[in-house]
Amino acid sequence: MFSSLFASSLTVALLASSFAVWMGFSMFAHARRRRWLRSVLRLGFAVLGLALAAYAGTLALASRSYERLLAEQEAARVAVRAVGPSRFYLQLTAADGRVRGFTLEAEQWRLEGRVVRFSGWARRLGFSPLYRLERLSGRFTSAAREQREVAQVLELAGEGLDLALLAAQLPRMFGFIENEFGSGVFMPLFDGARYRVLIGPQGGFSAVPEDERTAAELRRLGF
């Protein structure tokens, strides 16, 4: 029914704000006529409307960076281009069309994400689970070498409110949010490689070659 938390929360926030403004004007109108009881009642309704608008608006802002998770679907595409010895430029195209990229020196790339599910009234209303991509980073096959290297990470989540943070800091107000950390996926880096990153309904990531050239090189490398 209400599958989009962002759209539903934004709608509630706008309606509650409009209601609060209407109650505010009504409060002043009754106050001018010295109808104090009605004025106080309107003030109370206005405060309740503003509180609901603030709550719903917080949910809308916190869910903006998440995508709906309905079934196994494509979360991103990764294109690799060599720019020097053991140096590669990665271009990541997210499901919403945003394109980001950075250069790293590594043997493999790794993508990580987060999954959020709902319980209680949110689940009964039919809100779909949400996911978002968290970070793209470099990786080495040798754990010892990876410990020696400087971490190379591209932050994908960005700044702002986060549903998982709301659930952790204000569990009584946002207890219907179940924060579940998704998995990560890593694949080899080589010139011309192109991957599709998929996320399953349980929040697990997987990567598949986008073209036959990438598939052939992966077979040669034993992936």
Image (cartoon, rainbow, N blue to C red):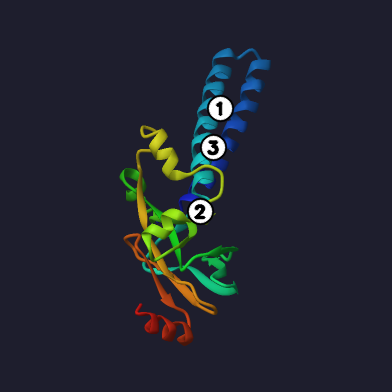
- Quadrant assignment for the N terminus: bottom left
Label 2 sits on a secondary structure element that is loop
Q: Dot 3, how many residues are within 10 Å of its Cα: few (below 14), some (14-19), or many (20+)?
A: many
Indicate the position of residue 187 as horizontal and vertical percent values.
42, 70
Label 3 sits on a secondary structure element that is helix
The Cα–Cα distance between marks 1 and 3, rounded to whole angstroms, is: 9 Å
Query: Callout 1, which amino acid?
Result: Ala
Task: Between residue 82 and residue 163, name the one nearer to us.
Answer: 82
- Check whether the beta carbons of the residues at disc 2 and disc 3 lie within 8 A of each other: no
Query: Callout 2, which amino acid?
Result: Val
Task: Between residue 63 and residue 83, name the one nearer to us.
Answer: 83
Question: Mark 2 or 3 closer to N-term?
Answer: 3
Label 1 sits on a secondary structure element that is helix
Q: Mark number for residue 150? A: 2
Q: Is residue 55 left or right of 143 when viewed as pictured?
A: right
Question: Mark 1 or 3 closer to N-term?
Answer: 3
- What residue is drawn where x is 49% and y is 48%? 63
Nearer the observer: mark 2 or 3; the answer is 2
Query: Callout 3, which amino acid?
Result: Ala
Q: Dot 2, how many residues are within 10 Å of its Cα: few (below 14), some (14-19), or many (20+)?
A: few
Residue 131: quadrant of the picture: bottom left
Q: Name the residue under label 3.
A: 16
Question: How many labels sit on residues?
Answer: 3
Indicate the position of residue 32 as horizontal and vertical percent values.
68, 16
- Check whether the beta carbons of the residues at disc 1 and disc 3 lie within 8 A of each other: no
The Cα–Cα distance between marks 1 and 2, rounded to whole angstroms, is: 54 Å
Q: Mark 1 points at which residue?
A: 46
Indicate the position of residue 197 as horizontal and vertical percent values.
44, 69
Q: In this view, does 122 lie above or below 36?
A: below
Q: Dot 1, how many residues are within 10 Å of its Cα: few (below 14), some (14-19), or many (20+)?
A: many
Q: Is residue 115 above or below residue 120?
A: below
Q: Is residue 3 visible?
A: no
